[in-house]
Amino acid sequence: MKRLTRRLTLALVTALPFLPATASAQDDDAGRLGLRFQNIVSGKELPAILLKPADTVSKLVIELKSSDGKTSKLSSGRIGAGADKRLEVRQPPGTKLDYEAKFDVTWGDGATSSFQMRFTLARVEELGLKFDKSDVDLDKRTMTFTITGSAVKVELTIVGENKQVLKTVTKDVAGHKPNEKVTISYPDPGATILFMDLKVFDVTGGFKGVHLTPVSTSIPHDDVEFDSGKWDIRPGEEHKLEATKKNIDEAVEKFKKAGVELELKLYVAGYTDTVGSHEANRTLSNNRARAIAQWFVKHGIKLDVFYQGFGEEVLAKRTPDETDEPRNRRAVYVLATQTPGKSGLFPRTNWAPAK
């Protein structure tokens, strides 16, 4: 049987921008002070104004007004020519603030100068994005995850098979608490999904994210033969299901090694030939698919298993009515991260859970 496989990959990505500073006047004095900024910091570290003056400074006073309306003052005594000086700015974690600053400098020779400058400082908490595969439901189109650090926005981008963006969903999470679960939902994209990018952003525009690709693969197997009109699995046929279970377990292990984080499920579809009525064949195929699905559950498969019968609706070999054709009496096993969509092979999507 031809194996159709889509792999899921999980990639963590991080980006952190640079925040510029601009002087409104006396750029020469700023240069003479050797003025620089440590304007993006994380964790317990504080942003800082960095100085390395070309000439000795006798005294320096910096008056600050931040975009949250607060004022503060920094000061320093003597700074020797060429010496490094760090003045930390106390700023709450998870914030990005714009500052208006006035610098009053008394140089070592007694001369004074004053200039103003605007700059931006950010103190971020390291972002983290964690989710359990059971919290991602591709059928209901929801994802629940935990954000560590001070995120302000979540963005989900859904890309189709032609690499065209199908949907982009954003959610404001500025008020979320550390390690609090966040759920994002997305509408039906209306097309097959190639991959999804989920990103969480901090106040600087820096982000972390995951790259998700849905998985679907058919499982090779030998079909179980049933007695006419029956759905009990004969002991002599169980070796076929044991071999199929081994193939399923190997496929699951392969996806795990490939980095699959979404929850895999098994779908069992049953089909019949054209002997008998349309309704009777649908019922018979459904009962046989259920029997196979229940066998997997009983024998310890570590997956949610679903089943559905399609009777004579999907013939592997086209035949007239009332034709005994073994190739049409078959099953299909699909391992996937979401319910198989309506197709020629699966004309309905009424999958039932095996218990």
Image: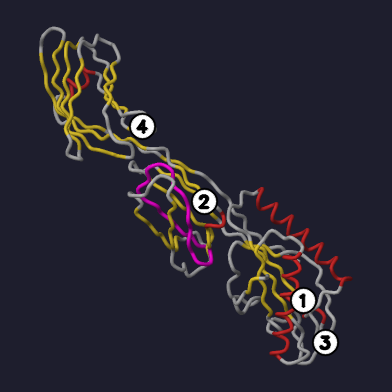
Q: Residue at x 29, y 11 (%)?
A: 83
Q: Residue at x 80, y 66 (%)?
A: 241
Question: Mark 2 to mark 1: distance in Å?
Answer: 38 Å
Instruction: Please identify, in this view, whether the residue under mark 2 or under mark 4 is nearer the observer.
Output: 2
**Membership of 143 in magenta stretch:** yes
Residue situated in front as seen by the camera: 13 or 133: 133
In this view, 47 is above or below 4: above
- Spatial separation of the CA atoms under disc 3 and disc 1: 13 Å
Q: Which mark is residue 131?
A: 2
The residue wearing badge 1 is 330
N-term-proximal mark, 3 vs 4:
4
Q: Earlier in the sequence, mark 2 or mark 4?
A: 4
- In contact (CB < 8 Å): disc 3 and disc 1: no
Q: Amino acid at mark 4?
A: Val
Label 3 amino acid? Asp
The front one of 48 and 29 is 48
Q: Amino acid at mark 1?
A: Arg
Q: Position of residue 26 (x, y in %)?
A: 14, 24
The numbered disc on residue 41 is 4
